[in-house]
Image (spheres, rainbow, N blue to C red):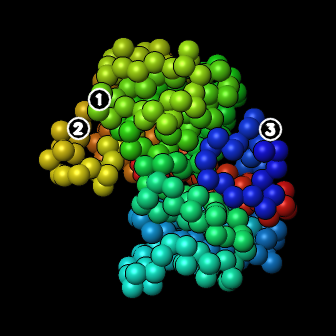
């Protein structure tokens, strides 16, 4: 795809290097513009729906603030129990309704594939803000942008993804982006929480490896991307407890990282990163969260053809 104009974004596989470089340039532009002007007047004729069927802090607030910083308007919900879903309405019917009211729909949903289902019935673009244990492409854009800002290129980086790679949708999306830039990927997880086959199949098999040992890779990588064990996707609390706390970065562990490497996390964190390392110059997770708004401003203007 060479343009996002009027397009839905369901998977990071839709984003090629040309689009990513446009997103990065625009995000930097909006970072400057917001600092200068606060609110811009680019999407004042547009209304966005923000449909969150699953909890969110950063993604929802950064999408909504992105739209409002562009002068656009927002409607939506963050608690699906207050909507007709509670009366048994299908996702398809909800979308067919909301598309009559708005120009674009941002949607998070607990089921993998929900964003694609929405696309199939929608006359307006759908932006996937996380579909169960599927993908989270806009998070991957802000992660890639943060890496680009810090390392000045995505080309040939060594990147370790650590934690719950089975259920973690942010890593499913980001590794597809990095795969385009000849990165060397290390998937670090307990065997049962490894990267799923449907993602591995999309990657260049000579450029990734899988291990259970963080120790093996920590001193080698340019980017260490930690993730939360996705409690809500386990069948039982006991099952979840087996994995909780399996990988932790604290003051001791961070000393093993290269001095010019970066430590990332999509947030929320549970215990994977000890707050004692937050002040380390390699810690980039709050920077990622901040970049979320600018990257989403870039995506919104591209989809509306106003970039
Ligand atoms: C992530 C998500 O929702 O997938 N959060 C986010 O959007 N920044 C990561 C997570 O919940 O662990």
Cβ atoms at labels 1 and 3 below 8 Å apart? no
Tell me which residue sits at (58%, 31%) in the image: 202
Identify the image quadrant of the C terminus: bottom right
* Residue at image coords 42%, 76%: 80
- Asked if the residue at label 3 sits under 8 Å from ligand 1, the reply is no
Q: Is residue 142 left or right of residue 25?
A: left
Specify which label sits upstream in the sequence, 1 or 2: 1
Q: Earlier in the sequence, mark 1 or mark 3?
A: 3
Q: Is residue 278 visible?
A: no
Q: Position of residue 33 (x, y in %)?
A: 78, 57
Residue 141 x %, y %: 63, 45
At 69% from the left and 58% from the top, the residue drawn is 8
- Residue 18 disc label: 3
Residue at the disc numbered 1? 190
Which is nearer the eye, 297 or 257? 297
* 86 vs 282: above or below: below
Q: Are marks 1 and 2 in contact (CB under 8 Å)?
A: yes
Q: CA distance from mark 3 to mark 2?
A: 39 Å
**Nearer to the camera, 2 or 290:** 2
Q: Residues within 10 Å of mark 1 (few under 14, many from 20)?
A: some
Q: Residues within 10 Å of mark 2 (few under 14, many from 20)?
A: some
Q: Quadrant of the N terminus?
A: top right
Sort mark 3 into few (<14), some (14-19) or many (20+) by Cα contacts within 10 Å.
few
Report which quarter residue 13 is drawn in.
top right
């Amino acid at each position: 795809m060479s343009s996002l104009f009027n397009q839905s974004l369901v998977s990071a596989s839709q984003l090629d290097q040309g689009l990513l470089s446009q997103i990065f340039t625009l995000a930097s532009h909006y970072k400057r513009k917001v600092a200068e002007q606060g609110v811009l007047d680019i999407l004042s004729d547009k209304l966005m729906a923000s449909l969150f069927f699953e909890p969110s802090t950063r993604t929802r607030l950064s999408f909504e603030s992105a739209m409002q910083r562009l002068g656009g308007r927002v409607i939506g919900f963050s608690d699906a129990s207050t909507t007709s879903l509670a009366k048994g309405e299908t996702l398809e019917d909800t979308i067919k309704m909301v598309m009559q009211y708005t120009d674009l729909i941002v949607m998070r949903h607990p089921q993998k594939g929900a964003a694609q289902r929405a696309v199939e019935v929608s006359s307006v673009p759908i932006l996937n803000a996380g579909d169960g244990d599927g993908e989270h492409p806009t998070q991957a854009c802000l992660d890639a942008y943060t890496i680009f800002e810090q390392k000045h290129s995505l080309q040939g980086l060594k990147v370790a993804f650590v934690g719950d790679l089975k259920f973690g949708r942010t890593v499913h999306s980001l590794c597809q982006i990095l795969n385009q830039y000849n990165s060397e990927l290390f998937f670090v997880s307990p065997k049962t929480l490894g990267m799923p086959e449907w993602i591995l199949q999309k990657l260049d098999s000579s450029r990734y490896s899988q291990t259970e040992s963080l120790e093996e890779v920590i001193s080698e990588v340019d980017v260490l991307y930690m993730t939360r064990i996705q409690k809500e996707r386990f069948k039982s609390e006991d099952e979840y407890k087996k994995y909780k706390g399996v990988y932790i970065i604290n003051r001791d562990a961070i000393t093993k990282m290269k001095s010019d490497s970066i430590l990332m996390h999509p947030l929320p964190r549970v215990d994977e990163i000890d707050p004692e390392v937050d002040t380390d110059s390699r810690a980039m997770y709050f920077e990622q969260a901040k970049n979320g708004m600018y990257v989403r401003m870039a995506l919104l203007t591209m989809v509306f053809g106003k970039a």
